[in-house]
Amino acid sequence: MTASKVYFMDMRASYQNSLMSKLSKVMDAGGISEVISERDLVAIKLHFGEKGNTAFIRPIFLAQVVDKVKAHGGSPFLTDANTLYAGTRGNSVSHLVTAVENGFAYSVVKAPLIIADGLRGAAFEAVDVNLDLVKVAYIGKEIHDADAIIGVAHFKGHEVTGFGGTIKNIGMGCASRKGKMDQHSGLSPKVRGKKCIGCGLCSEHCAHKAISLKDEKAVIDPALCVGCAECILICPQGAIDAQWDSDSPRLQKKMVEYTAAVLNKKKGKALFINFITSVSPACDCYGHSDAPIVRDIGIVLSKDPVAIDQASADLVNGQHALEGSCLTTGKGPGEDKFKAVYPRIDWSVQLDYAQELGLGSRTYDIVSITK
Ligand code: SF4
Ligand code: SF4
């Protein structure tokens, strides 16, 4: 397998070389000029952060990406698709309000925000992929219709896939509500009766009204549950759990097949950036961010969605864990930080399968951009 190039900048900066100017150089070196053509409508796919979350990428970095796209004649817009769960990004109105409140205003990012899958998540393109688990993928219409895509992902831990990076940002993040339900459909949380104290928090939080209380214990109705996994993190007693050994690999594979569906129409028109900063243990979909598990490492860029996530995982795992984070094991350089947070999740499934599908290579060469 040929090694893919992954361009890397660290977080050192100086008067002559700010992080903004380094990011600009990384985009040039990584070949943004080959991806963007005059008059392209360019989807910059990111996560605007749930209200209360603080780990998402700072809007001023997006402004730098926007500037670069414009410099190459493209018309950029910032985009994400609506979520499955109760929260502040479940429809386009609250999603856009949250984005602006988190700082993604036009005055800052210099590009319009367009939610990819319509007011309530019903605007999708049905893409025939005919893969093992996904026959038809339901992709947010505006992302599907864009001429080019730049994925800008915050690299962090993730409770269902081990980590979330480019593949998650594209495969899950570009899917419409129907597409997200399709990917989560194999995930079936269960309540452990002995641990449940009947507080009802999970029931209040479930957007699909799938949880009720019976004899002061939570009960999940599998017919209503879409497997969004929100209740698992909400429960203060740790009483809700999924069968990760079987559920996570299937979800990761579906997410990879969705990634293939999104990128199918963007051959030669896709570029990916991972911010390995504020590496929180869980997703930006929660209304809080726990302390980072490792120091801010840098920003990576590649045309290969597999290589960039492999390199990002390796860079995180090569670090010492930060004192004061949730990590109690796996703290040394070379130890798997994501496995330490989520012992039953094998995050390599997404990379293996993406490589098998020909989306990219787990083998990479790092090109450091220092000046
Ligand atoms: S949040 Fe947890 S403890 Fe509270 S009712 Fe739900 S399962 Fe039980
Ligand atoms: S029961 Fe849990 S996993 Fe199922 S829809 Fe409700 S919050 Fe999501």
Image (cartoon, rainbow, N blue to C red):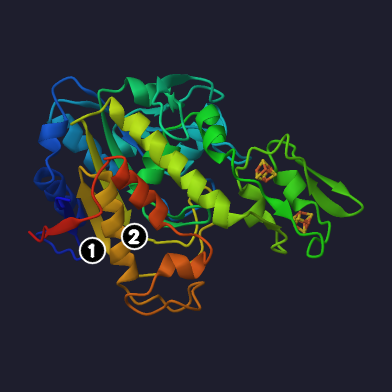
Kindly identify the residue that appears in the image at 50 percent across and 44 percent down.
Answer: 251
- Return the x and y of residue 250 as percentages of the image width and height: 50, 45
Mark 2, other Cα within 10 Å: few <14 / some 14–19 / many ≥20:
many
Q: Which dot marks residue 80?
A: none
Kindly identify the residue that appears in the image at 13 percent across and 45 percent down.
Answer: 30
Type of the residue with mark 2: Thr
Q: Which dot marks residue 277?
A: 2
- Asked whether 197 or 181 is in front, the reply is 181
Residue 356, quarter of picture: top left
Please, which residue is most extreme toward the right here? 215
- Asked if residue 345 can be seen in this view, the reply is yes
Kindly identify the residue that appears in the image at 45 percent across and 61 percent down.
Answer: 280
- Asked if residue 293 can be seen in this view, the reply is no
In the image, is 160 to the left or to the right of 151?
right
Mark 1, other Cα within 10 Å: few <14 / some 14–19 / many ≥20:
some
Instruction: Look at the numbered disc 2 and give the secondary structure of its residue.
Output: loop
- Return the x and y of residue 7 as percentages of the image width and height: 16, 53
Task: Write down the residue under mark 1.
Answer: 11
